[in-house]
Amino acid sequence: MSVPVAGWSRTAGSTTARRPVRIRIPKFPTFKRLELSDQFEIEQWVKLFPPYSDFNFVSLWSWNTTGGCELSWLNDNLVILFNDYSTGERLVTFIGLNEVDRTADILLDFSAQMGLAPELQLIPEMTARVMSSRFGRSLLRSPEHDDYVLSTEDWSTMAGKSFRNKRNEISRFERDHAPVCRLVDLADPTVSAAVMDIFGRWAVKRQYAAHSSTTTESLAVRRIFSLHRPGDLLAFGVYVDGGLVAYSINERLPNGYAMGHHWKADPACPGAYPYLLRETCLTLAAEGRPYLNIQQDLGQPGLATAKRLYRPVQHLRKYRVTAEPLVDARGRTLVMTGQDRLLA
């Protein structure tokens, strides 16, 4: 099944230049720290492209737990400097279709000057498709960063053998717990407190509480509540005997998409995850939103297996661009500028 995206041609090179709405984000090489007031400017740009999670404002804001996310415009492409999700190391990426080869060269030089790895990560497929194949450059797939896209219709009907196990999990959960799923308001302090309580229970029962990644994720969830209008997000709570046992925090996006940002369930309630996903997709499908992006697996085997079992209909692919070392006839490494590379 192919997922259509408005304004996205699948033919390499058949793209037209796009110009951003500039308000507060400066031109490269100047960067600014991510702020809530940047939401409109970012969203007006990224809505022109497939909904990659790395460039989604809510995701950027949520996971900016160290305050290190920085923004810039380069050749009318949005450049983001932030921390790697897994290692915490600084990385550079960009999204856009304008002068992409020149942009990549400049940013690779910038990375070298900043002492960062000589590569650009999380490059969206749409951007990668219009890059030239050139000496001194490697364009490599990053499957661990591909976003998983689900069909809300498939998850609403759950028909066929491929969904048999999930149907059984949901049936047992409904039989054992008689759950109620309803929309919740993230602007309500009692809801936010209940959400963090579920996160805490999950961390303790899964024995993840001592992991640094769990602390980061906890901070990321809390930052959702600091958005200007957190109540605008599509959030669901699953209740058993009046108490919250699971939650999901999602965002409505243009072009028939939604983004799943945070999901957690009390481990004492097996089956809560697929039940919550089905209920979420029922609402999205009824709203005319056929696709739900549940983001990447970061190369974690358990998470990758779980997301594959959710039966994605497509992946939003990502790439990394590396600077290959260039050597002369004597084997000496050549240091080349971005302009030199354009002529190579």
Image (cartoon, rainbow, N blue to C red):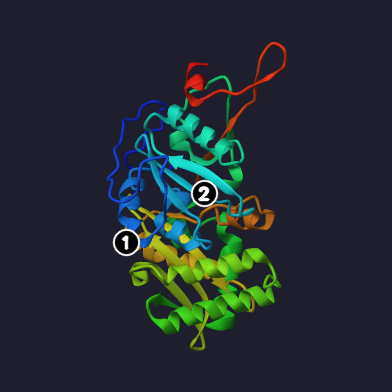
Which residue is at the far bottom? 241
Residue ID at (62%, 58%): 306
Q: Residue at x 66, y 14 (%)?
A: 328
User: What residue is drawn where x is 61% and y is 46%?
Assistant: 144
Label 2 or label 1, whichever comes before in sequence order: 2
| CA–CA distance in space, label 2 to label 1 | 22 Å
Residue 183 image-quadrant placement: bottom left
Query: Which circle, 2 or 1, is nearer the viewer?
Result: 2
The residue identified by callout 1 is 287
* Whether residue 256 is situated above or below residue 209 in the rendered picture: above
**Image spot of residue 127 (x, y percent):** 44, 35
Q: Point out residue 194 in the picture as x, y percentages from the top left corner.
A: 50, 82
Mark 2: which secondary structure? strand
The residue carrying mark 2 is 147
Q: Nearer the viewer, residue 256 or 329?
A: 329
The picture places residue 196, in percent across and down from the top left corner, at: 53, 77
